[in-house]
Image: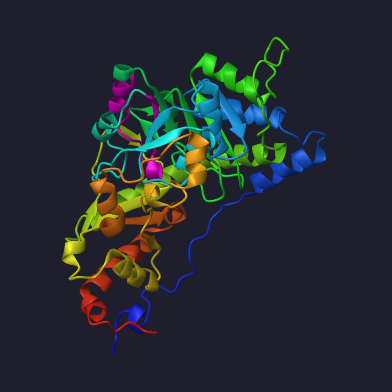
Amino acid sequence: MPVLAKCGGTPLRSKKPLGWTVASERDREGLREVYDGSFWAPGGEKEKEFCEEFAAFSDVKHCFTVANGTVSIQLILRALGIGYGDEVIVPPYTFIASVSSLIYAGVTPVFADIDPETFQLSPAAAERAITPRTKAIMPVYVGGRPADLDAFVKLCEKYGLVLIGDAAQAVGAKYCGRGVAHYAKATSISCQNSKNLTCGEGGLILSDDDAFAESLSTILNGGVGKDGKTGAIGCDFGISAFQASVLSSQLEALPAQIEKRSGNAAYLDRRLGELDFVYTLANDPKITVNAYHLYMFGLKEEKLGGISLERFVSAVRAEGAPVSTGYKPVCTFPCVGSAYAEKCVGGKIYTHPFIPAAERVSAHEACWIYQSWLLGSKEDMDDIVNALVKVYENRKELIEGGEAK
């Protein structure tokens, strides 16, 4: 009789999946306050209060709310004067929005490889990718884990470049005891529905730079500056007072959630570290808070007896454990090298960079567990580990091809 659920056996876990979002009565109260009030539009007291709270939480002076985490990067580029004909270095191991936002701004993305021990943009690879057209480096804090920010700050100072932080997944992350936004000229955060701080859809821009903040404020004010004159090409990408209210109440819950995720991640590190067919990501003592939008680890495919990453993870999921395989290199997506994308940036986008680590990790190693599961119990974490062990110990069923139809 088969043992693996993938082959017709009984799944290890039958409990209901852990869902997201986590709504509270405080969310409801805040929405009622806005509903009963007379101001629902962007720019009201709710938005101002949240921006002040979140700027303090993030260790920066300025916070702006915007429509989503894609336009946030476009707006950062516009406020910095980075656009058509310029290049920005990015990792290929990221969500498409990190790249599409550059292309929509007329900026050419230049891909540099990741560090296979962290899944983050490699400072050495980024330095090799610098050209005379490079204006900025944009590490993406994949999974909520900060990149090597000390190295990127020094690299940008060395070459006169701007550091932009794509912290879409890293709300609440800290590096050397400071919020990650402290290190970059400007930082983007997503508040889309799956994110750790959400209002359904939205984005945030953080900065400590007064000149940048004034430039961005003018753009978001329809191009009208403090002098009352239209001195910039402006836009309206604000969020409603309802969204600002939800962000404020969700922010109240965030510190306790970060602590819970961190505790479960540490437990997974210990349990998975005992398995010889799994590796956990390298520890960096400078990362004082990992936001853990994702818990990421790697499978040692050479230990799987010829079973591919995709097939092994599919079997783990059949056991009821929420493991997925994650990103594929975004530079391989046809849309990135399309005629339209190249028309946007005014030239060719090089879609075949030397990225052996990103290619290997994405195709053969990387596994993810989403943040909502990290709010679960130790028993939930044990179920994940035990599902991995069950599939590994019974991998012969997969090797022999006995999958249920």
Pinpoint residue 322: horizontal percent, then vertical percent: 40, 63
* Image point (45%, 53%), residue name: 375
Q: Residue furthest bottom?
A: 1
The residues colored magenta run: 133-156
**In the rendered structure, does residue 135 fall within the stretch colored magenta?**
yes
Residue 379 to residue 230: above or below: below
In the rendered image, the vertical position of residue 383 relative to residue 253, given as above or below: below
Rendered residue at 40%/70% (across/down): 320
Colour mapping: rainbow
- Most foreground residue, 102 or 256: 102
Residue 183: image quadrant is top left
Q: Position of residue 22 (x, y in %)?
A: 56, 52
Asked whether residue 196 is in view, the answer is: no
Horizontal side of 273 relative to 64 (left or right) equals left
Compared to residue 145, the image places residue 229 above or below, namely above
Whether residue 334 can be seen here: yes
Residue 371: where, in percent of width, then height?
A: 44, 52
In the displayed structure image, the side of residue 343 where residue 354 appears, left or right: left
Q: Position of residue 1 (x, y in %)?
A: 28, 90
